[in-house]
Image (spheres, rainbow, N blue to C red):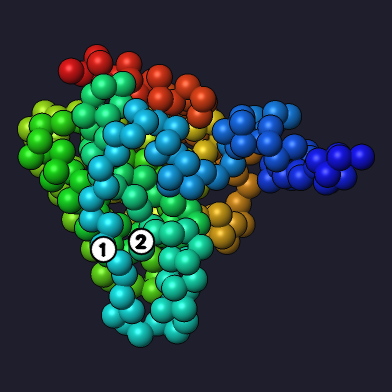
């Protein structure tokens, strides 16, 4: 037998339906379950590669990182752990890239970095990305994923809601085009600020979106609809404009950017 035949087939278990998926198939299908269609997490770099024209990305603000200003227990260790795990210095990747030939300011969150929670760095990166888009008169694409505002940074984290919302308002006043892409999960202050302020808001299928996270909602002890805080429910109630499968997201962005040119 060959070495390849001796090696066991690696599988991934779907977080939604528990189906066993061949790892190679899982990656080829963009980490979407063949059985139930569940969209699993992508890293910031994986999503960047999926959306932009190959080789067109110019990263900005890669040197920004969080500090432990409140001396929160174990926060420095968690930052160091996730910097090593992700290869990123913060929870967001940002810069300028082409999407279908259209120069675009883009920022993408990474859920692996302390749950994608929003600290002072994400507020600064989003704001700088918006300001760069305005300065260059290019469209803006922000891809959100967030566990809420980062408790380890307290009020400094909460301030980013007002900061990013003000930047979005200035951008909108100038009539430049902003596409907000919402992925699973997106909760808390991200939802209550820049995520909800796009000219067009697109979500992936099944994305959980809301202000209060699952634990806070559970504490209400009320029976809620099965699809509560899911993209499908939010579309039905007018909170988002479209639900787009991951495999079709780049095409959708290209069409929107062409339309708004």
Q: Residues within 10 Å of mark 2 (few under 14, many from 20)?
A: many
Q: Residue furthest right?
A: 1
Image x and y of residue 105, in percent: 23, 38
Marks counted in the figure total: 2
Residue at the (31%, 70%) spot, across then down = 66
Q: Nearer the viewer, residue 239 or 83?
A: 83
> What secondary structure is marked by label 1?
loop
- Residue 90, disc: 2
Which corner quadrant of the image does residue 215 belong to?
Answer: bottom right
Residue at the (39%, 66%) spot, across then down = 150
Image x and y of residue 166, in percent: 15, 49
Q: In the visual, does 174 lie left or right of 196? A: left
Specify the quadrant that holds the C terminus: top left
Residue 253 seen: yes
> What secondary structure is marked by label 2?
loop
Image x and y of residue 6, in percent: 87, 45
Task: Please report contact status of discs 1 and 2: CB closer than 8 Å, yes or no.
Answer: yes
- Residue 236, disc: none
Image x and y of residue 113, in percent: 45, 60
- Residue 64, disc: 1
Residue at the (72%, 44%) spot, across then down = 12
Specify the quadrant that holds the N terminus: top right
Q: Nearer the viewer, residue 179 or 224?
A: 179
Residue at the (18%, 43%) spot, across then down = 130
């Amino acid at each position: 037998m060959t070495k390849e035949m001796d090696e066991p087939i690696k599988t991934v278990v779907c977080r939604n339906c528990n189906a066993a998926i061949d790892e190679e198939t899982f990656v080829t299908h963009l980490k979407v379950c063949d059985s139930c269609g569940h969209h699993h997490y992508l890293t910031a770099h994986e999503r960047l590669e999926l959306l932009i024209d190959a080789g067109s990305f110019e990263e900005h603000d890669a040197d920004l990182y969080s500090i432990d200003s409140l001396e929160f227990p174990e926060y420095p260790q968690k930052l160091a752990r996730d910097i090593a795990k992700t290869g990123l210095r913060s929870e967001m990747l940002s810069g300028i890239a082409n999407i279908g030939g259209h120069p675009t300011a883009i920022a993408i969150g990474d859920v692996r970095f302390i749950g994608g929670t929003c600290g002072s760095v994400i507020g600064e990166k989003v704001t700088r990305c918006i300001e760069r888009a305005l300065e260059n008169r290019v469209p803006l694409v922000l891809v959100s994923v967030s566990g809420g505002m980062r408790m380890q940074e307290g009020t400094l984290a909460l301030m980013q809601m007002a900061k990013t919302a003000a930047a979005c308002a200035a951008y909108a006043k100038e009539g430049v085009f902003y596409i907000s892409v919402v992925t699973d999960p997106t909760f808390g202050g991200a939802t209550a600020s820049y995520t909800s302020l796009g000219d067009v808001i697109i979500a992936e299928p099944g994305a959980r979106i809301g202000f209060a996270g699952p634990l806070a909602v559970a504490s209400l002890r009320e029976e809620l609809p099965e699809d509560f805080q899911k993209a499908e429910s939010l579309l039905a109630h007018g909170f988002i404009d479209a639900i787009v499968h991951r495999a079709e997201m780049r095409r959708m962005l290209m069409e929107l950017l062409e339309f708004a040119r």
